[in-house]
Image: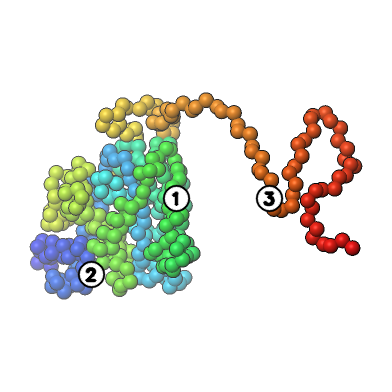
């Protein structure tokens, strides 16, 4: 008889992993060997990827925030040598989160480079059916990747955080990593389309990054719970995303993000997640579909929009441009002549002669009330 871990034990292992326990702690608490815990994690990560590809697609989501969360595999980047594996060192987890629905739409684990950024944005593009409004940080690869994947069918805002080692305005010292100067600290600019800069933000996805660090032991800062292999690291991220979307009830929504997005009808238990992931069949990633303009807000009319040829996006009529008429122009106010200084010895200026009068430049008249700074001999 094959040595197969019972389903109750698998559920117990997964329940500890998603709540932030390390592999060794999970092994001690569940009385399961460390290799078995790791093999269960890898199998669950593969199944959660299949579930994500099958269920998280064709989404009508307008506001999406993108961010990356740092971690490392085997050793930190400064310790990596030429003999080490290319997977060692920095390992960033890209996350794309719906602002209002709290759904983790897309994710990817890898180096923070242009190739992974393009793949991450392309996966996000394939899961949407509505022109989104993206908010990203100042990572330089985002505008290029967004432009290549979305073309003209996107509203993209860049939120740049200007970290500085200078002191605060009040003169107090600070740690620039955690307490940067507030003025000026955050600047927003438009990268594509016409995003609403007042609502552009990455605060919600950064709060989701905190949830990742609290529930995935491999992301806990300043500890020895880092990943030793990139495969285990990716499996841990996949398991967390599936548990976060389908099992964890969001405190502000009172339901799971999957229920809020309309892709689930009830709160999944950990056992249901394990059973569905282990029984998931191979599923290809979604293919990009034509993006449609977003639906108007309640009480507003649908704006005019026309699709451009060759899939280059949409020509949309945006609100604005109907300001109040400016007031009638006024004649400029003539400058006032400053009064003569009193007590400095300068006499009042004489009025200018009428126009056309020939001036005698060689005429000289001694000034009145001159101050004698030096006595005359």
Q: Is residue 287 visible to us here?
A: no
Mark before the other along the chain sequence, 1 or 3 = 1
**Label for residue 22?**
2
- Residue 127 placement: quadrant: top left
Instruction: Count residues near mark 1 (Cα–Cα under 10 Å), then give few for <14, some for 14-19, many for 20+.
Output: few
Q: Secondary structure at mark 3?
A: loop
Q: At x 36% / y 53%, what residue is drawn?
A: 67
Instruction: Count residues near mark 3 (Cα–Cα under 10 Å), then give few for <14, some for 14-19, many for 20+.
Output: few
1 vs 3, front mark: 3
Of residue 186 and residue 13, the one placed in the foreground of this image is 186
Mark before the other along the chain sequence, 1 or 2 = 2
Q: Position of residue 231 (x, y in %)?
A: 30, 62
**Mark 1 vs mark 3, CA separation in Å:** 50 Å
Q: Secondary structure at mark 2?
A: loop
Q: At x 39% / y 70%, what residue is drawn?
A: 76
Residue picked out by circle 3: 342
**Mark 1 vs mark 2, CA separation in Å:** 38 Å
Q: Secondary structure at mark 1?
A: strand
1 vs 2, front mark: 1
Does 310 appear above or below 271? above
Q: Position of residue 33 (x, y in %)?
A: 17, 72
Does 28 appear above or below 68? below
Q: Are marks 1 and 2 in contact (CB under 8 Å)?
A: no
3 vs 2, front mark: 3
- Residue 58 placement: quadrant: top left
Q: At x 35% / y 64%, what residue is drawn?
A: 71
Residue picked out by circle 1: 187
* Residue 328 horizontal side relative to residue 41, left or right: right
């Amino acid at each position: 008889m094959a040595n197969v871990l019972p389903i109750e034990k698998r559920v117990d292992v997964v329940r500890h992993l998603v709540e932030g326990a390390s592999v060794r702690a999970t092994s001690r608490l569940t009385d399961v060997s460390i290799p078995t815990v790791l093999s269960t994690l890898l199998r669950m990560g593969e199944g959660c990827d299949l579930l994500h590809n099958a269920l998280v697609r064709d989404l009508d989501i307008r506001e999406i925030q993108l961010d990356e969360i740092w971690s490392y595999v085997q050793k930190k980047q400064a310790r990596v040598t030429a003999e080490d594996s290319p997977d060692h060192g920095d390992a960033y987890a890209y996350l794309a989160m719906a602002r209002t629905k709290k759904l983790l739409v897309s994710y990817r684990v890898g180096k923070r480079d242009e190739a992974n950024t393009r793949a991450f944005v392309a996966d996000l593009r394939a899961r949407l059916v509505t022109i989104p409004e993206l908010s990203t940080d100042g990572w330089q690869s985002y505008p290029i990747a967004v432009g290549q994947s979305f073309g003209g069918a996107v509203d993209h805002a860049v939120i740049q955080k200007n970290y500085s080692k200078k002191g605060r305005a009040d003169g107090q010292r600070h740690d620039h990593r955690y307490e940067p100067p507030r003025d000026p600290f955050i600047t927003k600019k438009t990268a594509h389309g016409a995003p609403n800069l007042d609502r552009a933000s990455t605060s919600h996805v950064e709060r989701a990054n905190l949830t990742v660090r609290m529930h995935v032991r491999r992301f806990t800062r300043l500890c020895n719970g880092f990943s030793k292999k990139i495969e285990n690291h990716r499996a841990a991220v996949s398991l967390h995303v599936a548990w976060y979307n389908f099992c964890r009830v969001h405190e502000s929504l009172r339901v799971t993000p999957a229920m809020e997005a309309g892709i689930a009808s009830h709160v999944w238990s950990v056992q249901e997640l394990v059973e569905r992931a282990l029984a998931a069949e191979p599923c290809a990633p979604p293919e990009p579909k034509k993006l449609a303009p977003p639906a108007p807000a309640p009480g507003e009319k649908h704006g005019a929009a026309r699709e451009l040829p060759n899939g280059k996006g949409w020509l949309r009529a945006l609100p604005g441009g109907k300001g109040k008429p400016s007031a009638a122009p006024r004649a400029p106010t003539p400058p006032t002549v400053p009064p003569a200084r009193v007590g400095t010895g300068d006499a009042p200026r004489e009025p200018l002669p009428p126009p056309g009068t020939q001036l005698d430049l060689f005429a000289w008249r001694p000034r009145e009330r001159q101050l004698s700074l030096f006595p005359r001999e």
